Image: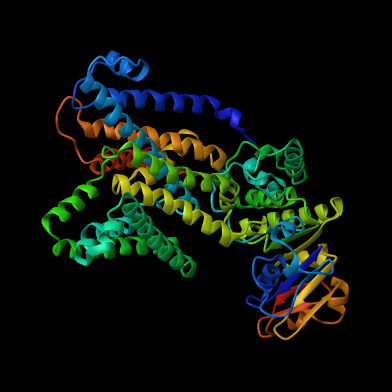
Amino acid sequence: MQTTRTYTTVFILLLVATVAVWFLNISLGSVNIPFREVLGVLFSSEAGNDSWNYIIMEYRIPKAFTSVLAGSGLAVSGMLMQTMFRNPLAGPYVLGLSSGASLGVALVLMGATMFGGVAASILFSEWGLVIASSLGSLLVLLAVMLASVRLKDTMAILIIGLMFASLTSAVVSVLAYFSPAAQLQQYVFWSYGSVGDLSWNELGILSFFWFLGIALALFSIKNLNSLLLGEQYARSLGMNISRNRALLIISTSLLAGSITAFAGPIAFVGLAVPHLIRQVIPVNDHRILLPAVILGGAILMLLCDIVAQLPGSEHTLPINAITSLVGAPVVIWLLVRKRKFLF
Amino acid sequence: MVAVIGINGVGKSTFLRTISGVQEALSGKIEIKEENRENISSEKLARMISLVLTEQPLSKNLSVPELVALGRQPYTNWIGSLTAEDRKKVREALALVKIEDLQTKKCYELSDGQMQKVLISRALAQDTPLMILDEPTSHLDMYHKAQVLKLLKDLSLSTQKAVIFATHEINLALQLCDKIILMKPKEVVQDTPQQLIQKGHFESIFPQDLIVFDRTTKSFRIKT
């Protein structure tokens, strides 16, 4: 019966790390701005240098906040899916959620030009991408859930997720083939993933969905803990299985869908962070796991973004590639070292 | 303490899962304390019936006290915080099953027998008048089978709980149970072990070609 108290130090460390990495993130970038100046821009009203001020306020800070939201949101949706599907390999990317979102976005970016007219003008609005991508991931998740009701075998569910991923990517390629170059390029850049393209407005929209998704997850904590015993025990403990499942699906698709819409399909964070956290704090209680995963996701994403910016150079790498490059070896290393997933 | 006995596939598990509410009734209706089960909310039912299933818990990474504490879920608040009362019940549940020494263990470190006791302890922590177990002794050796069933018997006496369990341990059930529900493909009989033996019900639960029931030793033996 370890209580939250036992983990206070871990949480303080995670929190300090998050803040530290956040500051590191905004002080590093293509333009070399001294740390003292960064603090000056942040904490005093007098702007020492107008362009530095602009870079930090309009580019780096929104980017850092986007990283925090995207990392934590994806990590939470990964944790929810791992518990819901009773599978340590589940995550928004593996189960085809991101592919569903990609399909939604591809239809909007490339399909809208084919349909044209009023539909396009609605779809091209800020909300259009979010709605399309959320709907896309919701559809895939529903299909996977339907399959999981019929199939008890979790391996089969994962394979179905992978099949959905190939199906959607096939449709995307067909769309891409018929699209004009400009739209195609827009889609390709979206698919590389980027946390740097959000205005303060868009950041507001993203955080709205983030709070909604996290709130739903928060209200599912007790049921998530019952689910650790399996669905039948959970039911015998008084849990309403279908209502809870619906809540979890909505929460996951809000998080994964909105993040994918704004930041592109970001691989590995959702799968890796819950495992990394379980290795650091050997705990299954979602009351502790949820906040730890939120902080862990934020830290990993901020770090990946620092690497992607290639500080000091004018190039920026696709964030999607970095998360995989960092995430995959870490998971492999942990697996080999511990010889098993603590799940 | 009531045992449910019958040949494989006769519907013991289905019967237990139906009365416990894990599964919908195929036909007919179930009454618990003269109330139709379908009218009992799942929250209320969780305070009436606790379960030990053949299915193993999903996460073996839970520690023993964590798993037992999950039995308190029907009583905890929306986020599942344990009150002092809950902690007391968990300690009592561990003590009743005599597994206080397993408190520091994780579930994946336990033997099958220990795991079964932890699951029984979890069901006790749920603090229900009725406890239902589906084949609690499968996978256990002869000694631990007897140990678990003896434990259930003692618990049913000390805590005044009704315990219903499905089992294939006819010999042990005959010695320990107050009543036995005998499920045969065409009829279901319920009586004390003595009565069931006298009326010759055990002779007909299995096909007659391989094993026969010996009334004097109250056990089955292979036909010679």
Q: Hey, which residue is sitting farthest left in the picture?
A: A181
Q: Is residue A334 visible in the rendered structure shown here?
A: yes
Horizontally, is A271 left or right of B76 in the view? left
Whole-percent x and y of residue A131?
36, 55
- Residue drawn at x 25%, y 58% as measured from the top left: A106
Q: Nearer the viewer, residue A202 or A140?
A: A202
Can you say which quadrant of the picture contains the N terminus of chain A?
top right
Residue B213 in the figure: left or right of residue B157: left
Question: Is A169 rendered above or below residue A199?
Answer: below
Q: Residue furthest front?
A: A118
Left of A284 or right of it: where is A257? left
Q: Which colour assignment does the render follow?
A: rainbow
**Can residue A343 be seen by looking at this rendering?**
no
| Above or below A23: residue B114 | below
Quadrant hosting residue B65: top right
Seen from the viewer's position, the closer of residues A314 and B189 is A314
* Residue plotted at (41% across, 43% down): A73
Count of marks placed on residues: 0
Q: Is residue B204 above or below residue B42?
A: below
Query: Residue A91's spot in the image, x, y percent?
Result: 39, 51
Nearer-the-camera pick, A332 or A122: A122
Q: Nearer the viewer, residue A75 or A25?
A: A25
Residue A335 is drawn in which quadrant? top left
Q: Residue at 24% of width from left, 32% of height from top?
A: A307
* Residue B182 screen position, x and y as percent: 76, 76
Residue B224 lies, in percent from the top left, at: 69, 81
